[in-house]
Image (cartoon, helix red, strand yellow):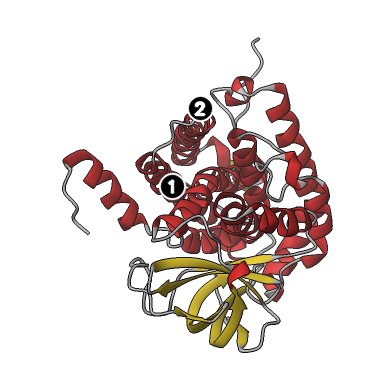
Amino acid sequence: MAARLNPLDLYDVRSLLTDEERMVQDTVGRFVDEKVLPIIGDCFDQGRFPKELIPEIASLGLLGATIPEKYGCAGMNGVSYGLICQEMERGDSGLRSFASVQSSLCMYPIYAYGNEEQKMHYLPKMAAGEIIGCFGLTEPHGGSDPANMKTNAKKDGGDWIINGAKMWITNGNIAHIAIVWAQTEDGIQGFIVPTDTKGFTAQEVHKKMSLRASVTSALFFDNVRVPDANRLPNVKGLKGPLGCLNQARYGITWGPIGAAQACLKEVLDYTQERILFGRPLAANQAIQLKLADMARRITSAQLLSLQLGRLKDAGKLEPTQVSLAKWNNVRMALDIARECRDILGGAGITVEHSAIRHALNLESVITYEGTETVHQLVVGRELTGINAF
């Protein structure tokens, strides 16, 4: 009898990975199994981000993983970074959000838009987890329209004076620096703002029902003075922050695959063991149809993200391709998490199982860094040539 296929990888996508990519996935997977899964349910329940995991995340080379080794980073390819996101979100979206913000939204703009002095000063310490960053783009009134930015920076001699507010900022209250985007007389520009600067305040957002194992903050800037040396000199306009978001969205296409796999694995085990009406729940046609549909959707998402990663590593990645995968894969994972919660019955509403935690987290993931509607409209614009925003 032929061996059964891996239920979490029906198309053997893993065989398409290089030895190095498989090693990255296995290393992060072990970390998640041994260090994250035993505590993450309690962290979610308590509304606590597990800061104690940061040193090991850093030591594994998972922060700024694709940035060259010259800057103290691992110099991995894009597919490896995607696999890091997938495995970390198998643990929890909040943990992947932490690493995604540090890597794609804070280290990447310093690497892509900073000067050599800024890169050498910040990137090695950020890779080591000694400096944590947050990304200040979204504003309370702005949401999906970042061009409607009220935060401003005005030149004052050799300094800049920043005033304004940012909202829904991951890592805000644990960050040492904020990458802040502000309107200037010369367009939108980015600034590295140490969080101990006079006039800077971070206020943590509480009473969240999603991403509870993550730090979310509001940032306030009251005449915050930073030197011109803290300005990112090599970009102006919205293409700066949008370039960062494209990096992060790429990782987000991979992350929810891990969340969906975690939910599917849980219900596969549960439906084999749960006896109803004299037989395992898994023996019901209705259950098998649901499980089969989950496997179909996970497989499609795996192939989408792998091809996206290959395009990225070939230098051929287009933002529309990222939008398609972000839209498809997060919707896939959210639907699967909800369906798994239903299959688990009453037990599914507690954090003893992962489905409700993933479902609640994914309600945020489907909204942040481009809502589902925004990504649909990006694809629509590509197909028609007409901007319907």
Per the rendering, the mark at residue 39 is: none
Q: Distance between the residues labelled 2 and 1?
A: 20 Å
User: In terms of depth relative to the viewer, which is nearer, 210 or 279?
Assistant: 210
Q: In which quarter of the image is residue 171?
A: bottom right
Q: Residue furthest top?
A: 1
**Which of marks 1 and 2 precedes in the sequence?**
2
Residue 215: give x, y in percent of width and height: 64, 72
Q: With 382 as the anchor, is 51 left or right in this view?
A: right
Note whether 372 is above or below 221 in the view shown: above
Mark 2, Cα crowd under 10 Å, few <14 / some 14-19 / many 20+, is few
Q: Which residue matches tag 2?
A: 314
Residue 221: give x, y in percent of width and height: 54, 85
Q: Quadrant of residue 321?
A: top left
- Disc 2 marks a residue whose amino acid type is Ala
**Which residue is rendered at x = 31% and y = 57% of the image?**
373
Q: Residue furthest front?
A: 157
Q: Which residue matches tag 1?
A: 326
User: In terms of depth relative to the viewer, which is nearer, 380 or 67?
Assistant: 67
Q: For marks 2 and 1, give the one nearer the viewer.
A: 2
User: In terms of depth relative to the viewer, which is nearer, 380 or 186?
Assistant: 186
Residue 119: give x, y in percent of width and height: 68, 54
Whether residue 74 appears in this view of the structure is: no
**Which residue is rendered at x = 38% and y = 46% of the image?**
323
**SS for dot 1:** helix
Residue 108: give x, y in percent of width and height: 59, 52
Whether residue 154 appears in this view of the structure is: yes
User: In terms of depth relative to the viewer, which is nearer, 349 or 215?
Assistant: 215
